[in-house]
């Protein structure tokens, strides 16, 4: 399907979604977010996709929500429509892993979108920030909540109160991103990482994603129990038998998602 604001491809069991509003540094508007949800759902339902990469351009992953669209809005508009809420819920409900490949600016809603993904690999050019405070507002899709869980209160508070940007090295040192790579290598690296995930049992991959995400939602005791029950349940799959047999027979496993 052709999109107005996205470029989408599937190759080697990896779905790649590139945000594509170059004139607005990939600012998030209603069309882009609706199309993004549509593309992610299509990949989630496509058995030939094992992992998804979400990226932007060299200059910007996304420079935030579209300020020109929001400027005329009033409380009744944003509260009445619950601006961006449905799309944010839908993005975080995707069951396959989504890796954010971030080069350049990931600001405001762009930083929040990257944090909705399962992990972030950053180019050395990446800059993260929640500059909404400069516009007289605060983040609206997780910037005060997810950033605090990623980097802790002190850094999240400073970023949200001052609007200062964090470079890639700082983002790696405080755990916002899993790795930093040279900008020229970003897409190859992230595609290879996604392809590696796509080789695993899709059932185990979904279980691992659910279990790690549960750590953000619950107590340690409940989270460990949730993990153990998923671990137990995976012994009902043929992929478990195949994975362990392949190890013992010193060969590569062939997972079928059954
Ligand atoms: N919304 C709409 N348009 C944007 C945009 C945004 N968030 N960010 C950049 N653009 C547009 C600019 O208006 C400009 O368009 P024109 O050429 O038509 O003027 C074009 O993209 C290029 O931008 P700049 O000329 O500003 O590029 P720069 O290299 O000088 O600066 C930047 C880059 C530092 C990222 C700067 O564009 C900037 O500060 N952008 C806004 C960042 C921001 O405040 N984001 C938060 C938005 S609010 C939000 O996201 C709420 C939420 O939580 C949901």
Image (tube, rainbow, N blue to C red):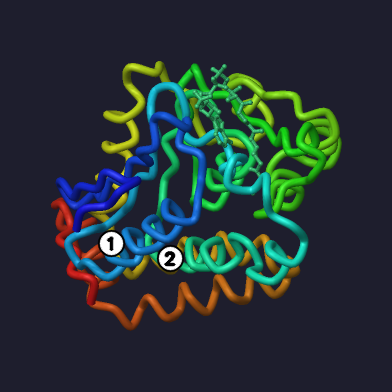
Q: What secondary structure is found at the residue carrying circle 1?
A: helix
Res 256 quadrant in image: bottom left
Q: Which mark is residue 221?
A: none
Residue 10 place in picture, x, y as percent: 18, 50
For residue 254, what is the image quadrant? bottom left
On screen, residue 177 versus residue 182, left or right, reads right
Task: Point out the image quarter for the N terminus.
Answer: bottom left
Q: Is residue 248 visible?
A: no
- If the picture is divided into quarters, which one holds ligand 1? top right
Q: Which is more N-terminal, label 1 or label 2?
A: 1
State the image coordinates of residue 123 (x, y, percent, origin top left): 45, 23
Q: Is residue 4 left or right of residue 151?
A: left
Q: Residue at x 25, y 63 (%)?
A: 243
**Image height of 258 relative to 53, above or below:** below
Which of 68 and 145 lies nearest the eye of the viewer? Answer: 68
Measured in 3D between alpha carbons, the distance from the residue under mark 2 to the one under mark 1, in whole angstroms, is 9 Å
Q: Which secondary structure lies at badge 2?
A: loop
Q: How many marks?
A: 2
Above or below for 80 versus 119 = below
> What residue lies at 33% left-to-right and 41% top-to-bottom?
18
Front residue of 240 and 71? 71
Q: Position of residue 64 (x, y in %)?
A: 58, 39
Q: Quadrant of the C terminus?
A: bottom left
The residue that appears at 35% across and 38% down in the rendered structure is: 20
Give the residue at mark 2. Answer: 94
> Label 1: how many residues lie within 10 Å, few (<14), some (14-19) or many (20+)?
many
Mark 2 and mark 1 residues within 8 Å of each other at the beta carbon: yes
Q: Residue at x 76, y 29 (%)?
A: 163
Q: Is residue 146 left or right of residue 203?
A: right
Q: Examine the rendering and report whether any part of residue 26 can be seen.
A: yes
Task: Give percent across and percent down for residue 31.
Answer: 42, 55
Badge 1 is on which residue? 43
């Amino acid at each position: 399907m052709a999109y107005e604001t996205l470029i989408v491809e599937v190759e080697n069991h990896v779905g790649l979604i590139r945000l594509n509003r170059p004139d607005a540094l990939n600012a998030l508007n209603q069309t882009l977010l609706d199309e993004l949800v549509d593309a992610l759902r299509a990949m989630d339902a496509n058995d030939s996709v094992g992992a998804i990469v979400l990226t932007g351009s060299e200059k910007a992953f996304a420079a935030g929500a579209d300020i020109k669209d929001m400027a005329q809005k009033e409380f009744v508009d944003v509260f009445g429509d619950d601006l961006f809420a449905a799309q944010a819920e839908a993005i975080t409900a995707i069951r396959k892993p989504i890796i954010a490949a971030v080069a350049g600016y990931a600001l405001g809603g762009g930083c929040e979108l990257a944090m909705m993904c399962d992990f972030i690999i950053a180019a050395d050019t990446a800059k993260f920030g929640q500059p909404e405070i400069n516009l007289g507002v605060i983040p609206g899709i997780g910037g005060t909540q997810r950033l605090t869980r990623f980097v802790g209160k002190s850094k999240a508070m400073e970023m949200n109160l001052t609007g200062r940007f964090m470079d890639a090295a700082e983002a790696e040192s405080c755990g916002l991103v899993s790795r930093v790579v040279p900008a020229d290598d970003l897409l190859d690296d992230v595609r290879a990482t996604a392809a590696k995930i796509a080789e695993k049992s899709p059932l185990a991959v979904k279980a691992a994603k659910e279990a790690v995400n549960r750590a953000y939602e619950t107590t340690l005791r409940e989270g460990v129990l949730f993990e153990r029950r998923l671990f137990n349940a995976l012994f009902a799959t043929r992929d478990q038998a195949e994975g362990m047999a392949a190890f013992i027979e010193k060969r590569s496993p062939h997972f079928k998602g059954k």
